Amino acid sequence: MKTRLCILVPAIVIAGPWSGNAMSASAPLPTLPLQHDIWITGTVQRGSGEYAPGDYTTIMLDRPSTSPCNDKVVSDILLGEGGRPAPTLLLPYLNQRVTVKGRVTCPDTGIQFTPQPDVVFPVW
């Protein structure tokens, strides 16, 4: 009996940190910087009317981040210029995964990313 107990106790102690309950706490998501040039990687998509009326493009981020505008988790960001959507922004890269340089802004409509169309690189 003592032999079994000596084997079980160390096994429980070793397995404890790797159990599902111990791993439930995850690292917080990074917050996108506001009004600073940053690089974002994601897939360029056509908007579905969720973020603005009419025709526009968005970028579906590879990894979700926290919005600097309202501290909510974002995975899809409206592409725009000067606070309004720009339907043709990055349209040549539609449905492609790209990395692009630009700035995050917080217009009245929510979070927006203003990319620099000259600094876009397809990612395969």
Image (tube, rainbow, N blue to C red):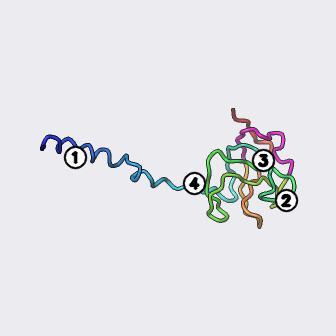
Toward which corner of the image does residue 73 lie, by quadrant? bottom right
Please name the residue that numbered disc 4 is placed on.
30
Q: Residue furthest bottom?
A: 108
Horizontally, residue 30 falls left or right of residue 101, namely left
Mark 3 neighbour class, 10 Å CA radius: few under 14, some 14 to 19, many 20 or more: some
Please name the residue that numbered disc 2 is placed on.
53
Indicate whether 34 appears above or below 40.
below
Tell me how far mark 4 sits from mark 2, CA to CA. 29 Å
Toward which corner of the image does residue 41 lie, by quadrant? top right
Comparing labels 4 and 2, the label whose residue is closer to the camera: 2
Please name the residue that numbered disc 3 is placed on.
116
Q: Are marks 4 and 3 in contact (CB under 8 Å)?
A: no
Horizontally, residue 91 falls left or right of residue 40, namely right
Task: Mark 4 or mark 1: name the one nearer the start of the chain.
Answer: 1
Task: Mark 1 or mark 2: name the one nearer the start of the chain.
Answer: 1
Mark 1 neighbour class, 10 Å CA radius: few under 14, some 14 to 19, many 20 or more: few
Tell me how far mark 1 sits from mark 2, CA to CA. 62 Å
Task: Mark 2 or mark 3: name the one nearer the start of the chain.
Answer: 2
Q: Foreground: 98 or 46?
A: 46
Q: Residue at horizontal 76%, vertical 54%? A: 78
The secondary element bearing badge 2 is classed as loop
Mark 2 neighbour class, 10 Å CA radius: few under 14, some 14 to 19, many 20 or more: few
Percent across and percent down for residue 99 are: 70, 41
Comparing labels 4 and 1, the label whose residue is closer to the camera: 1
Please name the residue that numbered disc 1 is placed on.
9
Residue stretch in magenta: 87-101
Q: Residue at horizontal 17%, vertical 45%? A: 5
The secondary element bearing badge 3 is classed as strand
Percent across and percent down for residue 85 are: 83, 56
The reply to whether the magenta stretch includes residue 99 is yes
Comparing labels 1 and 2, the label whose residue is closer to the camera: 1
**Amino acid bearing label 4:** Pro
